[in-house]
Image (cartoon, helix red, strand yellow):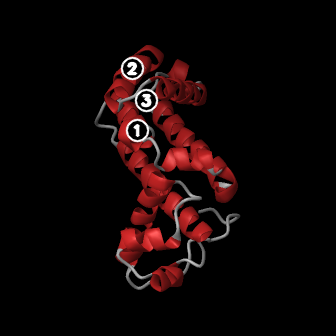
Amino acid sequence: MNAASPDTSGPRTADGGRREFVLAAALDTFARYGYRKTSMEDVARAAAISRPGLYLLFGSKRDLFTAAVTQALDRGLAAVAEVLADTTRPVSERLLDAFDLWTGRYIGPMSREVNSLAEEYPDLLGPITAEYPPRFAALLDAALAGSLDTARASQSAAVAQTLISTSIGIKHEVTSRDAFLERLAIAIDLIVG
């Protein structure tokens, strides 16, 4: 979270693993039922915690929702950064894995999870919805800048944005993760080479 964003993730607990488990259960519950239909009781049941215990961790359903989505996005970006940093692999493979982590896992059965929640409830998430896509683009840009030939390295940001736009188009046309990856691999090959 950047310095301009308030910390709405609730109080820190001595048992960080428990908090992470509660956030994962909350994300799954919000994804399954939507924000409006999910109650704190639903999340408490899914996380095997009492409702008062849940309120000790998170003061409101909105705080819980924001923290759950933020955790998922942070984890996604960390995984993307790790994949893209592995320069022992060809850039095309790293890009495909990065897009799979960022977008591919939300196609098909997982399509209602983080990305859908972020798109469906931008008013609840505030600046989060605008903060993460540019961070993903910056990771792609850096990987491309270090991998493209000198003549094309100056175009790395434009290439990254073109790949992002392409992935969004493919995401809306396919119904499975495999189809997404197959078509994106072709696009990466055509655009990056």
Residue 55 versus residue 149: which sits nearer the camera?
55
Q: Position of residue 106 (x, y in %)?
A: 42, 41
Which quadrant does the N terminus fall into?
A: bottom right
Amino acid carrying label 1: it is Ala
Q: Earlier in the sequence, mark 2 or mark 1?
A: 1
192 sits to left or right of 109: right
Asked whether the viewer can see residue 126, the reply is no
Mark on residue 183?
A: 2
100 sits to left or right of 160: left
Mark 3 neighbour class, 10 Å CA radius: few under 14, some 14 to 19, many 20 or more? some
Q: Position of residue 98 (x, y in %)?
A: 40, 38
Q: Position of residue 177 (x, y in %)?
A: 35, 32
Q: Is residue 59 above or below residue 176?
A: below
Q: Earlier in the sequence, mark 1 or mark 3?
A: 1
**Which is closer to the viewer, label 2 or label 1?**
2
Mark on residue 147?
A: 3
Amino acid carrying label 3: it is Ser
Look at the numbered disc 1 and give the secondary structure of its residue.
helix
Q: Residue at point 41% right, 23% down?
A: 184
* Residue placed under numbered mark 1 in the picture: 98
